[in-house]
Image: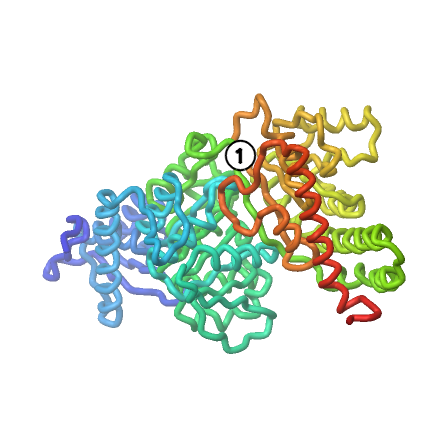
Amino acid sequence: MKYPAYLSDTDPHARTYGVLSYNRRSRCWTIKGDPCVTELAKRLFPGCDGRGRGVARFTAHRRIIGELNWLMLRYPLEIKEADRTRWENALNEAREYAVKKEQSLNAPQYVQPSEFVFSGKLIKFQQSGLAFLLNNRRALLADEMGLGKTVQALAFIASSDSFPALVVVPPHLVRNWVSEAERFLKPDGSLRLHVIRGLKPYDLPEADVYVIHYLLLRGWKNVLDKYSFGAVIFDEIQELRHAGTEKYSAASLLSECSENVIGLSGTPIYNNGGEIWNVINILDFHCLGDWESFTREWCYGYNNKIVAKPELLGEHLRREGLMLRRTKDEVLQELPPKRRLVQYIDFDDKLYAQLMEPLRDSFACLANAQTQSEKALIEDQICQIQRRATGMAKAPYVAAFVTALLEAGEKVLLLAHHHAVMDIYKKELKNYRPAFITGREDDKKKAEAAADFMSGKTDLCVLSLRSASGLNLQRASCVVFGELDWSPAVHAQAEDRAHRIGQKDSVLCYYLVAPGGSDSEMQDALGLKVSQFVGLMGDEKPDQQEEFLRQSEAREHIRRIVEKLKGSYGNNPN
């Protein structure tokens, strides 16, 4: 193995200038020696620290070990016998790291996963992202939202054969990770997936992918690090921007026990040094030095949390292979003008069950219906009750998803059908001062709401699915369907509020789908069973015959819904 000269062995017979020892508690190497050496170390290396004359500390990080060895070539140190094996191992790791960094410069810049392990096709910038992750196994993928960080992370797991993998996600994204993993990993159908439930640890079954949400980490803190995870993926890793919590401590232990640790976030934080240091420290311990040295050298003074030159820090993170970030503007030429993506989210089972109770009376009426038209009317009412219950039960999770978009700087149109659902959005998203166009406003209020969104007074506009016609809201970068409609034409029309002449962005349309309720049948009606970055529905205006056929199909889906509910709420299941 050919490694850089600064990582060569020191002369064992040379005069020494001090003693090098390892501190297990702080995980650092400490020099106690001549002041000329320790003073030089503190001046040369920002990550070097040490209070008092003749003392200098280096974090035991493979990058920093190289710097310490370079210093020892000029000023040899005596290594304590008890720490000699540890030093030799640390130096070998630093050499391997340096060689891999050099090799990565000549490695393929674009990688497409094998179809035998991954069922998707990455577009070019995603292939580049995968190549970056394969060359930098502890890194932050900080692409803007909507550029496929989840898909790139799954491609990394597959391409690096990092099974079993643990994916740590916010609560509202658990179901989406499950569905995406099932779609993309192991196309032969052999994927084993387990969602970790509850705060109380139990024996985990054998699986290829485990999914846990951040709120459970504290309960599993002393358990998960015992499992041999090939990779740990922290989705929305900004959840770990605050140290000192049980969640953070558990994540840190997990990171120590895996060779591959990838963070995903569309909102990397530069200005608040404390937060970015905490995030990067999870991925690669003390690669930015310890907290004191980081704030001293990168921020406005000791223990100050504000980064003095954010651009310089960002450049350093990219140069060191710690971060990759692409914006939509940078890859716009590779993106279609409009993209549709199905996103699976959770919903409140208890609230759903409570809202469905009125169906018992509806089924009693259905049993007594005298004519087909009367029967069809009651079936529609039953379907409406379920649609409303579904929308309300998933509304808080929709709001959490939209919050993440807004925090990432997106301009969002949020669409729903029921006023009760939009009232929940109003409560959950009040901090973002949303504009509302719901059918309850007069023309003046409607125009004011549209103007507020287009002028930038707010980045969120909540629209009724069937009250969006005739509006030009091309400032939007994302269209989010919190509820679904039976008609593809209604959705296409709503999408076109953003995707109009004057829109220079690639508009991303999210269809948020719950695991229960009416969404499953409505997905079938819309042809949204597959989650992918392609057009899933015809955008051309249907002719009269096509519209009639779609109405007939919707009627058939309504009958299926009624039939499914009959056993639970009908007075006569048979």
Q: Name the side, left or right, on which 51 lies relative to 84.
A: right
| Residue behind mark 1 | 338
Of 57 and 149, nearer the camera is: 149
Q: Which residue is drawn at 65% across and 30% down?
A: 497
* Location of the N terminus (image quadrant): bottom left
Q: Position of residue 318 (x, y in %)?
A: 37, 41
Q: What element carries label 1?
A: strand
Q: Name the side, left or right, on which 60 lies relative to 556.
A: left
Residue at the left extreme, as displayed:
13
Q: Where is residue 22 in the image (x, y as percent from the top left)?
A: 31, 65
Q: Residue at x 82, y 70 (%)?
A: 572
Of 435 and 269, nearer the camera is: 435
Q: Residue at x 30, y 52 (%)?
A: 64
Q: Where is residue 412 in the image (x, y as percent from the top left)?
A: 63, 36
Q: Residue at x 51, y 63 (%)?
A: 211
* Location of the C terminus (image quadrant): bottom right
Examine the image and state in which quarter residue 467 appears: top right
Q: Name the side, left or right, on which 143 lies relative to 10.
A: right
Q: Position of residue 530 (x, y in %)?
A: 52, 50
Answer yes or no: is residue 51 visible: no
Mark 1: few/some/many CA within 10 Å (<14, 14-19, 20+) = some
From this view, report whether residue 191 is shown above or below residue 288.
below
Q: What residue type is labelled 1?
A: Lys
Q: How many labels does the image show?
A: 1
Residue at the bottom extreme, as displayed:
203
Answer yes or no: is residue 58 visible: yes
From this view, report whether residue 538 is shown above or below residue 91.
above
Of 524 and 321, nearer the camera is: 524
